[in-house]
Amino acid sequence: MMRTPLLITAGLVLASSVAWADADLPGKMPGEWTMVSGVEDGKPLSQDHVDKAMLTLTDDTFAIAGGVGTDVKGTYKLDATKSPCEIDTTGDDGSTWRGIVKIEGDTQTIALAPPGKPRPIEFASPAGSGIVFHIWKKK
């Protein structure tokens, strides 16, 4: 007879853990974002790159333009039930980068691992990791 209360308690604990994740994140993503800072593979991006980079998001697409490198477009999928929220991006070239993302106020923080590397578990870009770590501010 003790199983029923135990199962209910376990279910409430699991349900409350989902509430900790950012269920509102998908609605916060769309818009135009300017880069605040960036680190890629442990190396800070140049101020010129940061100043020129623009990120445009819809409900499921992204476009990065204006940086010093090549413009990038593609799609993304979120799993807002995870904490931090997980994101998978697929570029027009077919490559998939897996990462984590959070939005606090008008600031988006994202860390993405290159194809074949494990999803980051923290918002950082250690040297040799290949991880892209960016902070964006919504316009």
Image (cartoon, helix red, strand yellow):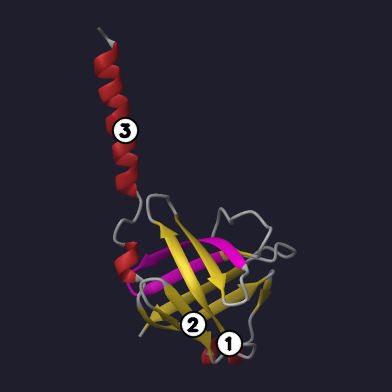
Residue at 63 percent of width and 87 percent of height: 70
How crowded pointer 2 is (Cα within 10 Å; few <14, some 14-19, many 20+) is rated as some
**What type is the residue that disc 3 sits on?**
Val
Question: Extreme top residue here?
Answer: 1
Question: Which residue position holds label 2?
Answer: 63
Residue at 46 percent of width and 63 percent of height: 101
Highlighted magenta segment, given as a residue range: 96-111
Task: Answer with the quarter of the image where residue 48 lies.
Answer: bottom right
Q: Nearer the viewer, residue 33 or 78?
A: 78
Left or right position of 75 against 92: left
SS class, disc 3: helix
How crowded pointer 3 is (Cα within 10 Å; few <14, some 14-19, many 20+) is rated as few
Q: Main secondary structure of the magenta part?
A: strand
Question: Which residue position holds label 1?
Answer: 71
Q: CA distance from mark 1 to mark 2?
A: 7 Å
SS class, disc 2: strand
Please name which of the two marks, 3 or 2, marks the residue nearer to the observer: 2
Residue at 27 percent of width and 10 percent of height: 2
Left or right position of 127 against 111: right
Question: Which residue position holds label 3?
Answer: 13
Residue at 65 percent of width and 73 percent of height: 40
For the N terminus, the image quarter is top left
Residue 81 place in picture, x, y as percent? 37, 50
Residue 42 place in picture, x, y as percent? 69, 69
Left or right position of 31 against 47: left
Contact check, label 1 and label 2, Cβ < 8 Å: yes
For the C terminus, the image quarter is bottom left
Please name which of the two marks, 1 or 3, marks the residue nearer to the observer: 1
How crowded pointer 1 is (Cα within 10 Å; few <14, some 14-19, many 20+) is rated as few
**What type is the residue that disc 1 sits on?**
Asp
